[in-house]
Amino acid sequence: MKTTRKSALLAGIAPALAMALASCTATSAPPAANLAAAPANIDPLANPAPGEWISDGRDYTAQRYSPLTQINASNVGQLGLAWYDDLDTYRGVEATPLYADGVLYNTLSWNITTAYDARTGEVLWTYDPHTPREFGRLACCEPVSRGLAMSGNKVIIATLDGRLIALDKDIGEELWSTRTFELDSGFAYSITGAPRVFGDKVVVGQSGGDLGVRGFVSAYDVETGEKAWKFFLTPGDPANGPDGEASDPVMAMVRQTWSEEGMWKTLGGGANPWDSIAYDPELNLVYVGTGNSVPHARFYRSNNEGDNLFVCSIVALDATTGAYRWHYQMNPGEEWDWTCTSSIISADLEIDGRQRQVLMQAPKNGFFYVLDRATGEFISAGAHVYQNWNAGFDANGRPITTDQVRYGVDPRLVAPGPGGAHNWFPMAFSPRTGLAYFPAYQSAFVYALQPGWTPQPMRSNSGWGGYTGEAGRIRGELMAQANEIEKAWLTAYDPVNQRIAWQVPLPRHGNGGVMVTATDVVFEGTTNQTFAAFDARNGSVLWEYPTQSAPVAGSITYELDGVQYIAVNAGWGGGAAQIERGAGIEMPRAPARLLVFKLGGNVALPPLPAQASAPPEPPALRASEEIVRRGAELFAQTCSVCHGQNAIGGVADLRHMDRETHGKFNQIVLEGLYLDKGMGRFDDILDQEQADAIHNYLIARANEDWGR
């Protein structure tokens, strides 16, 4: 059945060791006994009932592996829709739902959270935290939320504007609310990742690394919301003294890996943990996957010097105190927007005849990593896509970065590109097959410095250039090479032997998160606009359901009254959609929906409405070439994170504005006409002349691609 909701409620839905050791593991005293968390054998988050899914990765291993067996390879073809809910948005919906005690919990853009009767889809309650719509401007890849957390009688949300809110899971009423960052910090903080409950603490990171943040992770008492500890992941300006936080003792080591002078002091350096945070209750360690650097270009950020800890790293912290335990840095001196915020999965594997407690991660840089989760020791890593940045690893596991990817003003082709070989889309691991499953993307991108670049507040502060003149010509030639290697797959990976076990080709980047069951069935949403089941042993397609939108979120499975269900959000959007729209590929799609399946389900989706495929004819271009060039630079600095490189694609493809929208351009950009839809106003960083230059650039781009 289709569920309904009050339309008025949802009407607003519309980032002291030598530098030589910086990328290797660094250890201190052994972790203390786990005083913070309940013992693993009685903690429901460590050992959920087989039919429940009460945390983002299902349990603390984050394997997204379910022991349920009713749905198997022989009957998965009988899956049908049990119920669905129209979510009333074309925004990306990236959340993994949660399930407990007969209730399914889901969250959307702007953190609007709903509880459903998991049998029928009846809406039990909806909570709107009234997230300010202007924060959509700070979210590089739409104002998404990747999920919720649960603890006892509480559902916990982390809002885009930095609040951590606990709700009564039965009635949706607020129990406590706390602020994780101040609104006047001077940094472009937001939160798009899911909070995590580890024992008696809620741990959360933040987004904003493309604009300018000093990354940190913080923990709060799950019963009261009171702050327990905070750990900064890049150094502060030494002139300001210690932070008074758990990271203070390690900041001398961190500071040695940054230049004396650089824009990191004003833009924060980045390393924000915008999604993946994991936990081992026996070791009492919290594992933090950190984001990219800011500015992206190390030339501007850190004078082309240093490893710049802790960008693109996994950092292990004591769960009780937040104290540093160890780190491993995937990309010393990161400058390609390669975040290490992809899924962090725990497992016990036999490697070289020895049982190892490991962490596994496949971050953006194209490698699959296996680390010792107690010490951070590098065990192994292997490339699963074409890459040209790494010539190998030294004896300590430090990558050997090739000179050809360290760019200056001359464009360089680097693989992977900033979209990443594996982005945030959740990875799964099956202890039965010993394989990890994740969506992979083979890509490349052209990087170059913009000469004389200066950062701007609350903009995308990359320092990248080379879009005009001779550099622009070279960029075009190199991007043609990049387009030739672009491919996407569902990949099954053997972490013990560091090899691809099998791959299923898929049409485009943006294939969704993965879940696997004890019957060796893998579930994933695809950019074919389907939700599909694959044989976990060989990749054979077992079942596909047309969803009318690409499900990018992770799915879950739960059992209620002896019936196994599968639930997934189908809402194409976010960063992957921007990249793929940027390739000029856009499929007609329905608004986002929550879809719930069971064996024998017989509910049908309504037909996809007809949509015009041809963009409107653009107005004539009357501006000078110089104005258009200036508009291109301003667009790249200010607008491209939401509206695509070279104005192709994005949240809304601005080449396809109709005449009415062109007429309201200044009202939209400078006056906030579409603030309620998440389009911020930019009169604080753009004047009328600059807005006109951007507008003329967009008119030029529309005319170029219209074929004149």
Image (cartoon, rainbow, N blue to C red):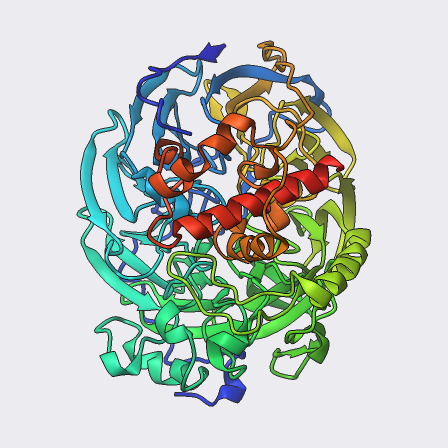
Residue 628 in view in this figure: yes
| Identity of the residue drawn at 54% across and 53% down | 631
Left or right: 538, with 10 as reference point = right
| Identity of the residue drawn at 41% across and 87% down | 260
Q: Nearer the viewer, residue 469 or 517?
A: 469
Question: In the picture, residue 392 is in which quadrant?
Answer: bottom right
Left or right: 277, with 82 as reference point = left
Left or right: 112, with 560 as reference point = left
**x and y, in percent, of residue 468 in the image:** 66, 61
Question: In the picture, residue 284 is in which quadrant?
Answer: bottom left
**x and y, in percent, of residue 479 in the image:** 75, 57
> In the rendered view of the protein, which quadrant contains the C terminus?
top right
Vertical side of 254 occupied by 83: above or below: above
Vertical side of 475 occupied by 546: above or below: above
Q: Nearer the viewer, residue 527 or 498?
A: 527
Q: Nearer the viewer, residue 221 or 199?
A: 221
Vertical side of 172 occupied by 700: above or below: below
| Identity of the residue drawn at 48% across and 45% down | 57
Question: In the picture, residue 323 is in which quadrant?
Answer: bottom left
Left or right: 140, with 379 as reference point = left
**x and y, in percent, of residue 31 in the image:** 36, 72
